[in-house]
Structure formats: C-alpha cells, structure tokens
Image (tube, coloured by chain):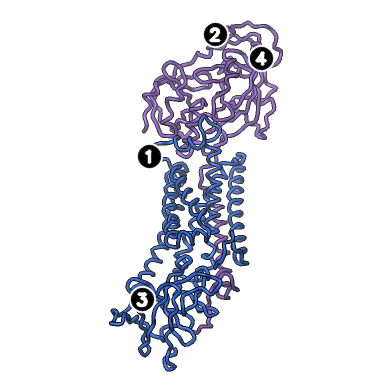
C-alpha cells in the first residue's frame, strides 16, 4: 500500500525474491555459455562469444516469460503460488532487460559495422512481409520488445494509479500479444535455422504449458462463477438473495457472489456480515479470496487492506472500494444489488447469536 | 474449516510467511532451479552453433593480388607442384562488413606481401582485413593477364631472396596446427618454385551444372557466426555482401560435403548487389563451373538465379 511514491518499497521478502531471481538467471546464462564452450572444445572449436551470448540471453528471456505467464493461472489454481505473484513486476522488468541485451547484442553482431545504420539495416535487411516462410522474424521480436518496454516503463504503482487499474491491466495484457509475437519470432527465426526437431518440440511444450494452464484456470473460474450466481431477483427493496448462508462462510473469510454481473465479497467477522466489491482498487485482485487481518479485508495479491464497514483503507492510505447493504433473514444473506459509492460507511448486518457458525 | 488450521494460512509479503507456504516454496524453488539447470544444459546441444569454421590467426602471404571476379590473392604452393595445382587462392575482405580496402585493391595485378586474419571452413579460406605492400615479383615467376593496367610480366628484378611464405609459418595465434587449406605443408618444405607462370584468368571449364544451395557472405559463414547461414543470418549476410564481401554459394554434394563456389556474371564481374534478395534462401543456379586453381566459380547471369 502506498501513500507517497517510492521507486521500490523494499521488504525482506522482496529482497529474497530478487536475489533468487537474479541467481537463477545468472546460473542459466553461465551454464548455457559454459556448456556451449565445452561442446565446442570437444570438436576443437574455440568458443564463439557473442553468438552464444545472444542465444543465452534470448532463451533466458523466453523461458522467464513462460514462468511469468504461468504465475497468474497457477495462483488461480492453488493459492500457495501467491508468493511468486506479489513481485511479478520485478520478474517482468528483469525479462525486459534480458530481451534488451539479446536485441542489443544481435544488433551489434548482425547489423553493425556495415554500410547502413544498424537500426535501418534491421528493418530493410529482410522485407518479405507477405511470405510466411521468409517473413522477417526480427520484426516480431522488435514489436514484442516494444510491448515489454511499455510494460516495464509503466510497471510502477505511479502509473497504475494514474492510468487507473482497468486501463493499466489492459495495457499489461499486451504480454499475451508479446508472447504470441515471440513464438513467431522463434518459430520463423531460430527454428528455421537450427534444424534439430527437439528445439521445435521444446517451443511446442512451452506453448502447450502456457495455453493449458490458462484454460485450466479459466475453466475453474467459470465453474466458480456459475456456483457464485445469486439465487434470486431483487425484491421491492432492491435486495437479492445471495444463496449464501452465514454458516457457509468461515470466520474472517468471505464468499463471492455474482449479482447483476458484479462480483461481491461477503465477509464474516466479529459476529457481523459485510459486503464489498470483490475488486481490489490496486490491481483488481480478488478481495473475496482474501482474509480479514487486523480488522481489515486484506487482498491476497499484494496485501492491500480495506475496512469492511466502509471499504476504505485505514489512514493514511487512501484506496477505497464500493460497499453494499446487507440484510439477514435467519441464516440467509441478502445483499442490495446497487452498491454504495466507494468508501461509503454501511452498517454491517449483525449475526443473531443462534446463527454464529 | 478451523480458521487457525494451515488451510486457512494467509500470505502477505510484508508479514512473516505462514509455515504451509514456506514448506511449499522449499519444494518449489529447488524444482525451478533444477528445471533451469536442465534447460540451460540441454538447449546448447540442440542449437546448430557448432561447425568447423575457425579463425586461424594472422598470417602472411606473398603472391599475386587479383581484383576480379572477386578480390583474392594467388599464392604459389610450396614444394614440387609441377604435377598438381600450383597455387592456392584466398578470397579477401575487410575486417567489418565491407570489401577489402581500396588501398589493397589498388595493388591488384602486382606481387604483394600481405598480412591478414585467416578464417576458414573446410577447404574454403578467406583473408580478413589484410594489409599489403607491393614487392618485387620473385625470379622465375611470369605473370600473364594480370587483370589491371600494370605490366608485371617477369622476369622481374632478382631482388627477393626470401622464400614465399606458406600460410602457417608466421604469427599464427591458433593453437591448431591445421593450415587454412588442406594442401599446406610444414614450413621447412618450402622451396621457391624454379619457374612458374601465373595467369589469373586461366581457368578450366568443368562444364554446365545446375546447382542447388544458398548464397552467403564469404566471411561470417566460415568465421565468427555460427551457424552463419540460414534465415537468422540473412540480414548479416546481406549487409556483408552489399558492403563488398564476396558472395559464396554453398552447395552440398550427395555425400553431404559442402562445396564452395564464388559467383561471377557472364562478363566475369562480381554479382554482389544483384543477389541481395536471394541471400540466405535455397536457390538454384545454372551455369558454367570454372576452376581457377583451387577456387571454384559459377559463371551465370544473376537474373537467372531462381529461388526454390
């Protein structure tokens, strides 16, 4: 949570995360270059520096992108992966740096020291844009790199707040376009020149993994959405029967219901029931999968907190989410379909002693 | 569910990590590292980044500098060569993506001492970034058709006393004793040929052939680039060839061996700027194959080169 903007708000966990990330990448690049040199030595061929480094950094970025794309759906499938999520933007920026090193080295080796400016050479070297087999794979890589640049440049919470979460998230969904472009970059480039079929198999496994995980997460999400549909229509007072009972909710946790297409998180705590929008103002994380900690609804993604009574972050923080009126009929929970504006204080429903689960 | 049970653990990055998450990560992170190790060890094996192209070190040559169809130097082979090919021809280029310097080219038709970096792949060799100076044509060497206006017809002054250098006898920084071409012998075998005639234009026609292969630049393919061919290398090869580095046509024979052909048009001129759209693609060239000593050249109109 933030009051002012700092370049990075370091925590011990974030430091450990970054150390592990950098160590893993350093190990990968070192091993790739060392194994290449060893294979060369066995054939009495001296190691070839920059060409091998181009492949080491390029493949490191591509592998890391698979890890980054896996974190989201893995977290939907199992919340134990959440410790990988909160600092994913550092992973993304690191991947952009790796891709940039790959691009800079490529530009220097393949396009510099010639009779054209290297950037111009990059675009005019191959202009077979209407021939799939001969398509200039470099262009796919450049566009993907530009998307990564946009994402890295706007990765800070300053941009998240000022662009607003929906626009920021839409912009960062560009990662999927970038992934598709990179599959094209690799398929139309490296796979055409390096003839070992295992390289194609490796890229295929990566694609199946990424697409499969997203499908699995989407199927689970659709199932939960179906289960969370409110059972009734709004009555004369505007309340909707949610289908959730007090006993269904674990203390300090929530159940998510979908009312008029909007997900609402219904929390139970201290003998009370309160309902708020399921969408965290920070990155639209699922608040209903969070927990009440220190009296605050706490988002599972980055730990942003809101008071259940008014949907406002405790001072000095300023984030706010919409709140909903709640009514109990016996054990059954009713929620008013139309929310209050973000930060509006609403009296939580008191659970009769006989209904405390 | 009991709120205090491990299943109700809740992770916040700014708070101590619950035990169940810690246990999970203690398994997950080593698995991720093992995966990274496996991929890093596996990928270099399936990239085509190893071939016999080598940088052989700086070496000195003495021979006749020729400008066409591509700049090259004709070096008399050491020892008794009366019954075989008497000369090796080494193609020339600059150190960057450009043809050999004009300063060197100005010496075309003359006997020169040349020093440059030798890169080679199988039987093909190139001298990169050479410096050269004109020296007296050795005694007994007769040059006909020197390909420029300078008349170097011997006998020249009887000045030179040094033996003609073989490629490997000076300043090779390569630990590999292999010479740039298969024919070279150790330095002690060198003898100045008694009487030789060099005609750079005297080639033997091997007949008309239809050849399938790939046009690449003559420097990166045998040198620093690996694989140095195919689509990933195309942009580089286009820069090199458009910059003046001789284009080389690589053809694989039935035994999977690579044959290297230089390209000339029907007028005997270099084809560089006319083949750029075809570089790095599989193409077919039909033309007369000429052998100039150990150099093979396909003579054909570049307009007839066809993409396959």
In this rendering, the label closer to the viewer, 2 or 1: 1
Q: Are marks 4 and 3 on the same chain?
A: no
Q: State if disc 1 and disc 2 touch (CB < 8 Å).
A: no
In terms of depth relative to the viewer, which is nearer, B83 or B179? B179
Disc 4 target residue: B192
**Sooner in the amino-acid sequence: mark 1 or mark 3:** 1
The label shown at residue B149 is 2
Q: Quadrant of residue A83?
A: bottom right
Chain A appears in which tint? Answer: blue
At 43% from the left edge and 56% from the top edge, which residue is drawn? Answer: A171
Chain B appears in which tint? Answer: purple
Disc 1 target residue: A129
Q: Position of residue A41 (x, y in %)?
A: 62, 42
Give me the C-alpha separation between circle 1 and circle 3.
Answer: 48 Å
Disc 3 target residue: A228
Q: Position of residue B142 (x, y in %)?
A: 59, 8
Give me the C-alpha separation between circle 4 and circle 1.
Answer: 56 Å
Q: Is residue A34 left or right of residue A145?
A: right
């Amino acid at each position: 949570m933030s009051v002012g903007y700092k370049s990075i708000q370091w925590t011990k966990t974030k430091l450990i995360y970054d150390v592990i990330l950098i160590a893993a990448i350093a190990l990968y690049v070192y091993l790739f270059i060392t194994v290449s040199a060893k294979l060369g030595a066995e054939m009495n061929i001296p190691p070839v520096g920059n060409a091998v480094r181009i492949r080491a950094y390029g493949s490191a970025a591509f592998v890391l992108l698979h890890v980054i794309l896996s974190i989201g759906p893995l977290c939907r499938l199992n919340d134990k992966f959440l410790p990988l999520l909160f600092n994913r933007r550092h992973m993304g920026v690191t991947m952009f740096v790796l891709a940039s090193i790959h691009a800079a080295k490529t530009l220097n080796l393949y396009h510099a020291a010639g009779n054209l400016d290297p950037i111009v050479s990059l675009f005019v070297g191959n202009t077979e844009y209407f021939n799939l087999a001969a398509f200039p794979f470099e262009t796919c890589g450049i566009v993907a790199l530009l998307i990564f640049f946009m994402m890295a440049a706007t990765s800070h919470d300053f941009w998240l707040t000022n662009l607003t979460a929906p626009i920021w998230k839409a912009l960062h969904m560009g990662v999927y376009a970038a992934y598709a472009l990179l599959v094209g970059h690799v398929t139309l480039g490296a796979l055409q020149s390096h003839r070992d079929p295992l390289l194609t198999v490796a890229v295929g496994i990566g694609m199946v993994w990424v697409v499969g995980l997203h499908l699995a997460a989407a199927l689970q999400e659709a199932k939960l959405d179906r289960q969370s549909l409110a059972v009734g229509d709004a009555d004369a007072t505007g309340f909707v029967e949610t289908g959730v009972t007090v006993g269904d909710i674990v203390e300090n946790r929530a159940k998510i219901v979908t009312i008029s297409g909007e997900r609402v998180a219904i929390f139970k705590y201290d003998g009370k029931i309160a309902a708020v929008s399921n969408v965290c103002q920070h990155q639209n994380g699922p608040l209903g999968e969070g927990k009440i900690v220190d009296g605050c609804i706490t988002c599972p993604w980055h730990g942003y907190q809101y008071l259940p009574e008014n949907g406002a972050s405790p001072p000095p923080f300023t984030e706010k989410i919409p709140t909903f009126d709640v009514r109990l009929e016996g054990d059954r929970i009713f929620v008013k379909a139309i929310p209050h504006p973000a930060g509006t204080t609403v009296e939580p429903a008191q659970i009769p002693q006989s209904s405390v689960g | 569910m009991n709120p205090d049970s491990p299943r109700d653990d809740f992770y916040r990055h700014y708070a101590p990590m619950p035990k169940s998450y810690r246990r999970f990560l203690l398994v997950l992170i080593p698995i991720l590292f093992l995966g990274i190790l496996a991929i890093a060890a596996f990928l270099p094996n399936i990239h085509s980044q190893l071939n016999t192209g080598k940088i052989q070190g700086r070496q000195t040559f003495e021979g006749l500098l020729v400008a066409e169809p591509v700049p090259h130097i004709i070096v008399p082979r050491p020892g008794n060569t009366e019954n075989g090919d008497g000369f090796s021809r080494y193609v020339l280029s600059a150190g960057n993506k450009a043809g050999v310097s004009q300063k060197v080219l100005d010496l075309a038709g003359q006997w020169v001492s040349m020093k440059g970096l030798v890169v080679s792949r199988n039987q093909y060799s190139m001298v990169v970034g050479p410096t050269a100076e004109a020296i007296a044509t050795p005694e007994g060497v007769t040059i006909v058709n020197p390909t420029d206006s300078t008349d170097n017809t011997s006998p020249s002054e009887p000045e030179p006393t040094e033996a003609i250098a073989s490629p490997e006898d000076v300043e090779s920084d390569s630990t590999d004793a292999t010479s740039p071409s298969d024919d070279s012998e150790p330095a002690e075998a060198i003898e100045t040929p008694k009487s030789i005639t060099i005609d750079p234009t005297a080639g033997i026609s091997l007949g008309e052939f239809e050849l399938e292969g790939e046009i690449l630049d003559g420097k990166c393919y045998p040198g620093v680039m690996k694989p140095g061919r195919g689509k990933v290398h195309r942009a580089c090869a286009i820069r090199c060839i458009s910059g003046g580095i001789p284009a080389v046509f690589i053809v694989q024979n039935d035994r999977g061996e690579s044959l290297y052909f230089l390209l000339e048009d029907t007028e005997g001129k270099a084809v560089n700027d006319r083949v750029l759209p075809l570089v790095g693609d599989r193409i077919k060239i039909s033309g007369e194959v000429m052998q100039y000593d150990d150099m093979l050249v396909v003579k054909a109109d570049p307009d007839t080169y066809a993409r396959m």
